[in-house]
Structure formats: C-alpha cells, structure tokens
Image (tube, grey):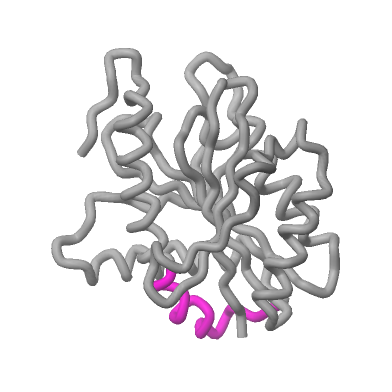
Amino acid sequence: MVAPSKSGRLNINVRHKAQRGIAILALRILHDAWPATAADSTITRKTDEDAISDVLRWNMVAAKQRIDPVPEMKFLREPQSDRPELDTPLGLIDIMVSYTWDESTYLTMECKRISSTTNSLALKYVRNGINRFASGKYSAGHAFGIVVGYVICGSPDGCVDRVSKTLAKEPKNRTGLDAKFGWVADVETIYGQTLYRTKHLQRDHNNSIELIHTFLSLN
C-alpha cells in the first residue's frame, strides 16, 4: 500500500510507478475476466455498455480471487467522480479500481461500445470517454487511466483504426492529445494481448495522464 503525502497527493514519481503497477494488474484481471463475460447468456452485441460492465465487474472480482495472494483492490461500479472542493459530483465512473485507503489514489476504467462500421460510436469513445480524462472530469491529476472498448462488429483492428483516426481529427483543446507521443501499440505489457497507449494534457490540473486502451470482442 502506498501512502499519500501530507497534501493528499502522491509524489509524482511515486504516483506514476504505483499507478502503473496497479494499471497492469487491473488489465491482467480484466483480460482474465473477459472470456466469462463474453460467454454470459445475457450479453450480446446489442447489449448496452452499462449491462456489460455490470457483468464484467463481478467477473473481475472472481478473477481477482483466483490470484494467490489475492490483491488488495476493489472493483467499484459507478462510484462518483468528485473532488472535495466541489459541491456536486462530476460524473459516475464505470469501474473504479480502489487500492489504498486514500480516496484520491484510485484508477478509473471507462467502458464504451465500439464498432468499425460506424463513426458515431468512435465519436462517443473520444468525446464521452477520452475527453472526460482530458478535462479532469475523471482522474484529475492521476498518472494513468484505462479505456475499454467493447467491440460489437467482430473487427478489433478495424475499431482501433477508427478510434485512432477519430481521435486525431478531434480538437486538441478538447482531447488534450499529445500528438508527439501519438497512438502507440503495446504488445509487451500483457502477454498475448495488444494494448494501445496515448497521452493527454489535463490543462486545468497541469498534469499529463497516460491512457491505456484495450479492445475486447463480443460474440
């Protein structure tokens, strides 16, 4: 367990290292939980993302229990994204990975349906997913975030291509995209899986957050 500083914020180097480790572990659990989720009789390509995330969260809990020793983390469904200086919540996080006693050190997983055959879902992935991190609505001041794409068209590669191109076309003042970093394929973090990474400036928080994207196919 990593303790925060007296200000309630982790030292940036400690925070980056700690959240990277948590992000990798959460992603491994996510991928271990996905086969049972995709095989669930209640889940089809027409199922809305909230219902998919409901099933996925509990399968992640089950997958976590199979690890020895069991990781000290919780998967919370739709907790509030908020900050102590604000009177109202900013939004609801799809799956929050809670891993310390301090509320400021969670990891956010944002989940979106995605298809390679239409641009509307790719726009939602960017505008209602990525941009929520860039604006600080989710994970303000955090080092990492995760975006999960529920692939409903049978073509993960096509979805990756559509999302990356859509992101590149959207206004940089909204996405905070670090164009120099780009859209990076990652085949090393999790054995047998291809992830994608982007960086985004959270201007209001003077912070750069790295988003890890993973695309999971529905039957």
Q: Is residue 14 above or below residue 129?
A: above
Position of the C terminus by quadrant: bottom right
In reply to whether residue 199 is colored magenta, the answer given is no
Residue at 52% in and 43% down: 210
- Name of the residue lying farthest toward the front: 180
Residue at 61% in and 60% down: 50
Position of the N terminus by quadrant: top left
Q: In the image, 151: left or right of 79?
A: right
User: Count of labels shown?
Assistant: 0
Position of residue 95 measured from the top left corner of the image (x, y, whole percent): 49, 52
- Name of the residue lying farthest toward the left: 69
In reply to whether residue 43 is colored magenta, the answer given is yes
The part of the image, by quadrant, that contains residue 134 is top right
Q: Is residue 58 above or below residue 72?
A: below
Position of residue 196 measured from the top left corner of the image (x, y, whole percent): 56, 59
Q: Front-most of 78 and 112? A: 112
Residue at 55% in and 45% down: 93
Position of residue 164 measured from the top left corner of the image (x, y, whole percent): 72, 58
Position of residue 12 measured from the top left corner of the image (x, y, whole percent): 37, 27
Observer able to see residue 81: no
- The prevailing secondary structure element of the residues shown in magenta is helix
Q: Is residue 115 above or below residue 207?
A: below
Observer able to see residue 141: yes
Residue at 78% in and 61% down: 121
Q: In the image, 51: left or right of 33?
A: right
Q: In the rendered structure, which segment of residues is drawn in magenta?
A: 31-45
